[in-house]
Image: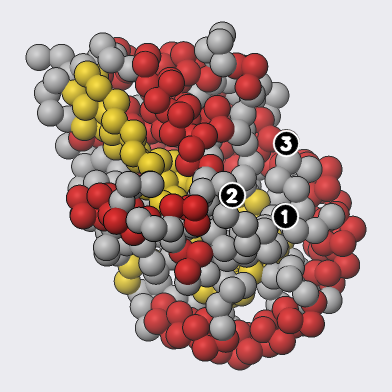
Amino acid sequence: MQTVVENVNVVDLRVPTSDTLLGSDPFHKKPNYSAVLTTLETNTGHTGVSVAFTAGAGNDWIAYGVRDLGQLMPGMSLDTFIDDPGEFHRLLIDHHQLRWLADGVNRMAAGSLVNAMWDVWAKHAEKPMWKLLVDLPPEKIVQCIDWRYLRDALTPDEALQILNGNRDSTRQRERPLLQSGPKAYSTAGWLGLTDAQIIETVNQVKALGFDCFKMKVGQELGFDRRRLAFIREAIGEEARLMLDANQIWGVDEAIAYMEELTAFDPTWIEEPTARDDVLGYVKISRALEKHGIGVAAGEQVPSPVVFKQLLTSGGIQYCQIDATRLAGVNDVLAIILIAAKFGVPVCPHGGGIGLCNMIQHYAMWDQICVSARSDTQVVEYLNFLQEEVFLEPIQVQQGAYVAPTVPGWGLEMQADFVAAHTYPTGSVWQGREASGGVTFLA
């Protein structure tokens, strides 16, 4: 029997993290971590699950987009998708009624359905997503990618050369990665947390073997210098310290600000300026190179084309793919391959609801099949919204992710969590609906 999509179910989930200030940064001062949960229901019982992360009321926009595009899904067969995943991807991103909307919400909504179809495929194959990708022939990976705007940076033949060049040693890299997992780092220094709360988080993840930590900066220079001093003391001189400004600065401001923080030996400054200012990133990277500070970005980069520009120009030294910002697996495969060609380590962006669960699969595929493994590749990890949310929460040990083994993405959620956090009907929102919507201001 062919597996055919029969229904698309979309749920708007919001968590009032504005109460605890977990996730707070210079722009998102009181975020409500949220996700659009998409489930494809099929005639054979296989379900395709995906999430699209937002920070609150943006869920309204994504949920509408997924439901609207979801009208194309009933009757879609898994065999048709497997035969040409690239054709399905183009159906959504090139829809003649919607392409005028460009990227952003449009691409994220498309990605929700693309990622859910990949989940159906992986479950049908009874493989975790990373293993499905690892086992695919290089020709199938290349077939998935929309090459129209990328060929000037990476051709299909070059992609095949990268993948085939690693093919014979794939199993040699897979075995140790299954044992020790991709190296992780912890975001501990949320702006809204007290020093005591940050130290508590640092100590928790240090006990798990972490030696890489990230702190939010950009609120005020004196505040940042004081906080960086005590965090550097807490983590030790040998630990890696990464900084994240969440796009708060202009280009010259970013350079001047970071030159005041060189004494703390940061590995990178993440999102120092606007998400798509490629020339700005080039200028910042060149200015900070002499200080040994790299530039990282990608969690809000809206398309593979902007990634192409950042990677080919030297605008970033760390490529931070996000699992739900783009139009799904197909887009991310392309970016990882371009990053490999230009020697830029892929350090996926995690956090939110479900992002860490997904990015571990991309890190596994990258480090097994594409770039191979090195200590320059670190994967973001957050130690909340896991045990109480997912049936198969992510696991870490000795400072690394534990390789997932359940089929698909592993995004199935606890029914009680879904019921309680569905907006605005869930129990956690009763009597406080306004604090979850667009009129709630920090």
Instruction: Name the spot of residue 271 as percent of width and height, x first.
Output: 69, 55
* C-alpha gap between disc 1 and disc 3: 18 Å
Q: Is label 3 or label 2 in front?
A: 2
Q: If you read the primary sequence from the N terminus, does the residue marked by circle 1 or circle 2 appear first? A: 1
Which residue position is annotated with label 1? 247
Q: Quadrant of the C terminus?
A: bottom right
Q: Is 203 placed left or right of 100 in the picture?
A: left
* C-alpha gap between disc 3 and disc 2: 36 Å
Q: Tell me, yes or no, if residue 192 can be seen here.
A: yes
Q: At x 43% / y 20%, what residue is drawn?
A: 69
Q: At x 65% / y 51%, what residue is drawn?
A: 297
Q: Tell me, yes or no, if residue 394 can be seen here.
A: no
Which residue position is annotated with label 3? 309
Residue type at mark 3: give it.
Answer: Gln
Q: At x 46% / y 13%, what residue is drawn?
A: 91
Q: Is 291 placed left or right of 93 in the picture?
A: right
Q: Secondary structure at mark 1?
A: loop
Q: At x 72% / y 55%, what residue is drawn?
A: 247
407, 412: nearer the viewer: 412
Q: Is label 1 or label 2 in front?
A: 2
Query: What label sits on residue 439 in the rendered view?
Result: 2
Instruction: Name the spot of residue 346 as percent of width and height, x first.
Output: 55, 50
Q: Residue furthest top?
A: 96
Residue type at mark 2: give it.
Answer: Thr
Instruction: Name the spot of residue 22 as percent of width and height, x first.
Output: 50, 68
Residue type at mark 1: give it.
Answer: Gln
Q: If you read the primary sequence from the N terminus, does the residue marked by circle 1 or circle 3 appear first? A: 1
Category of crowding for the residue at label 2, using alpha-carbon neighbours closer than 10 angstroms: few (below 14), some (14–19), many (at least 20): few
Category of crowding for the residue at label 1, using alpha-carbon neighbours closer than 10 angstroms: few (below 14), some (14–19), many (at least 20): some
The reply to whether discs 1 and 3 touch (Cβ–Cβ < 8 Å) is no
Q: Look at the image and name its color scheme.
A: secondary structure
